[in-house]
Image (cartoon, helix red, strand yellow):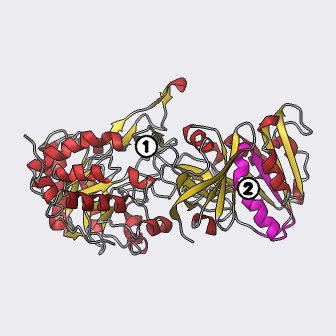
């Protein structure tokens, strides 16, 4: 498996919630060997922004890759406004993805744009006839990317969405919902979302087989600059190269 | 690799290209090497190695502007013993000539590290990082005195089996005195400049936007400053000068060559675009052809200063 730099054509750019878009790119090289949980470094607004921006790979096929992007800053705003037909430079696929094992059941836990790294995982688990359930949390009803949730429902057996504010069948955050679920029925947990959500999950899941996908500011995304190092029980680790997926119990959450 | 531009760096030998990947921006992860393998790279400089292992600075370690990057990595590295033990295993895969960058707290520390590096077969030179602004100790202080810096270079050059490159901070490059001292002390080449000490604040939190109070600035914004320094120092020393700071395009590299740099270092922008060496070398080739120059060294001969 190797990483490549590639110019990727924007095939579509669709809003999926109040602040998220799904962008589909044509990719001959990067799309071919993606492991769920990996990311790409994307050249965003290169005239104004110095560094590339890391984004989880949301979906892929033989010749396309998709990103689920929330408007969160100059790079992501620029990308969400990109027009179909533009060419964007990317480097990827990068990082260490999720590990896929056999078991009684897998629970995906996502918050906001954290769903981005879980879609390919859900598909991969489903393909291996693994049982997948999902619990996704959002702040407001209008933040729910309905189209994205629909795609998840093709591979996940049970899918719970919860919102912190507004009228929705389930309310509260993912921790509130997790406490209502018999978690002993699952033997693998995969989490991605804001750092506050991941930290709140630690008391419930760190003793179990749990993987988390972390977000970090990066300069290179290639394991070279050590700009994204985090503290783990086995010393400093680079989110871009040793991660972004880590075992929950490996991370020093007090230092995060 | 293209070999159109053999670059004579004196004691360091002849490199296949004038492009050197600067310290701190070359890594050994295999996928990254695969990206670089086809690039016309003359040499690579390792991340700076210190006597003892260093965990580096707290997060955040990066702050970015449109034309600059401030980093506060803090020389995270495994220490000299681990580096030497694992050198063959790690750098055996690297197809480019390797320059090892080291930094110490004292003359003695530099000497001990130089002696340990003598056990290696691989490197073509040792670069002395005399200036890293992130290191909060007397290392910075001795870098501010020509005689003490000269002593580090002199002792290292005496003990080392490899040619010594003295890498200057912007403060050491403000005039020619440090370069001259390094030259007299036996350095085989001078490289400049290291990152510029810099700050950035998170005003709403009334504190630094980095995990430390300040860091080192690189990126295109430093180029005009560094270019002037390379111009002044190249005229004063008769050993090769490796110019670096903010090279993002072939034209930037040509400017450095024009003011007298024998080779050029790329760093921050190579992280963003790993294909930068190819694009720089093809830009240099077109420039030479367009202006009907004899070769790469002819670029500096044509500079008009009057």
Please give the residue where the numbered disc 1 appears in the rendered image: B72
Quarter of the image for residue B264 reads: bottom left
Whole-number angstrom distance, CA of label 1 to CA of label 2 = 32 Å
Q: Which mark is residue A158?
A: none
**B15 vs B125, nearest the viewer:** B15
The location of residue B24, given as percent across then percent down, is 38, 54
A88 left or right of B129 in image? right
Q: Quadrant of the C terminus of chain A?
A: top right
Q: Quadrant of the N terminus of chain A?
A: bottom right
User: Please, what secondary structure does the residue beneath circle 2 have?
Assistant: loop
Q: State which chain disc 1 sits on.
A: B
Stretch in magenta = A101-130
Q: How many marks?
A: 2
Q: Is residue B135 visible?
A: no
Q: Please name the residue shown 64% across and 39% down the image.
A: A71
Please give the residue where the numbered disc 2 appears in the rendered image: A118
B160 left or right of A218 in image? left
The location of residue A207, given as percent across then percent down, is 77, 56
User: Please, what secondary structure does the residue beneath circle 1 have?
Assistant: loop
Q: Please name the residue shown 18% across and 61% down the image.
A: B296
Q: Residues within 10 Å of mark 2 (few under 14, many from 20)?
A: many
Q: Is residue A133 visible?
A: yes
Q: State which chain disc 2 sits on.
A: A
């Amino acid at each position: 498996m190797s990483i490549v730099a590639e110019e990727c054509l924007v095939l579509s750019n669709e809003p999926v919630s109040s602040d998220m878009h799904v962008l589909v790119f044509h990719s001959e090289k990067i799309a071919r060997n993606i492991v769920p949980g990996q990311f790409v470094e994307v050249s965003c607004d290169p005239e104004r922004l110095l560094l590339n921006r890391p984004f989880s790979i949301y979906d892929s096929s033989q010749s396309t890759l998709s990103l689920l992007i929330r408007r969160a800053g100059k790079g992501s705003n620029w990308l969400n406004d990109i027009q179909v037909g533009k060419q964007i430079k990317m480097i990827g696929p990068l990082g260490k993805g999720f590990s896929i094992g056999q078991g009684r059941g897998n629970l995906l836990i996502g918050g906001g744009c954290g769903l981005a790294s879980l879609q390919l995982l859900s598909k991969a688990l489903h393909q291996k006839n693994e049982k997948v359930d999902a619990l996704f949390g959002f702040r407001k009803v209008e933040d729910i990317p309905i189209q994205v949730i629909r795609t998840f429902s093709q591979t996940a057996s049970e899918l719970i969405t919860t919102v912190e504010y507004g009228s929705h069948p389930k309310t509260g955050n993912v921790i509130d919902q997790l406490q209502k679920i018999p978690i002993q029925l699952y033997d693998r947990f995969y989490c991605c979302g804001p750092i506050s959500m991941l930290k709140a999950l630690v008391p419930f899941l760190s003793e179990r087989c749990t993987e988390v996908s972390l977000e970090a500011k990066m300069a290179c995304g290639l394991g070279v600059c050590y700009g994204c190092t985090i503290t783990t029980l086995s010393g400093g680790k680079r989110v871009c190269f040793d991660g972004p997926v880590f075992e929950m119990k490996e991370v020093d959450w007090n230092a995060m | 690799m293209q070999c159109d531009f053999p670059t004579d760096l004196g004691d360091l030998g002849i490199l296949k290209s004038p492009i050197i990947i600067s310290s701190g921006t070359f890594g050994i992860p295999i996928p990254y090497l695969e990206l670089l393998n086809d690039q016309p790279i003359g040499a690579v400089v390792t991340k700076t190695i210190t006597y003892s292992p260093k965990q580096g600075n707290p997060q955040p370690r990066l702050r970015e502007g449109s034309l600059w990057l401030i980093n506060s990595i803090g020389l995270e590295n495994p220490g000299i013993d681990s580096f030497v033990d694992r050198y063959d295993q790690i750098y055996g895969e690297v197809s480019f000539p390797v320059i090892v960058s080291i930094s110490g707290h004292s003359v003695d520390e530099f000497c001990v590290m130089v002696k340990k590096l003598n056990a290696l077969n691989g490197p073509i030179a040792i670069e002395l990082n005399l200036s890293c602004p992130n290191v909060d100790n007397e290392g910075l202080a001795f870098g501010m005195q020509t005689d003490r810096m000269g002593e580090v270079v002199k002792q290292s050059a005496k003990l080392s089996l490899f040619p010594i490159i003295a890498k200057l901070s912007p403060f050491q490059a403000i005039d020619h005195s440090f370069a001259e001292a390094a030259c007299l002390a036996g350095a085989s080449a001078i490289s400049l400049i290291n990152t510029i000490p810099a700050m950035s604040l998170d005003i709403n939190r009334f504190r630094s936007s980095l995990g430390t109070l300040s860091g080192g600035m690189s990126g295109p914004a430093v180029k005009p400053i560094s270019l002037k320094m390379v111009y002044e120092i190249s005229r004063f020393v008769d050993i090769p000068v490796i110019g670096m700071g903010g090279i993002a395009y072939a034209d930037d590299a040509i400017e450095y060559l024009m003011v007298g740099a024998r080779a050029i270092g790329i760093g921050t922008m190579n992280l963003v675009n790993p294909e930068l060496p190819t694009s720089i070398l093809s830009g240099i080739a077109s420039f030479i052809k367009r202006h009907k120059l004899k070769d790469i060294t002819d670029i500096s001969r044509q500079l008009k200063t009057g």
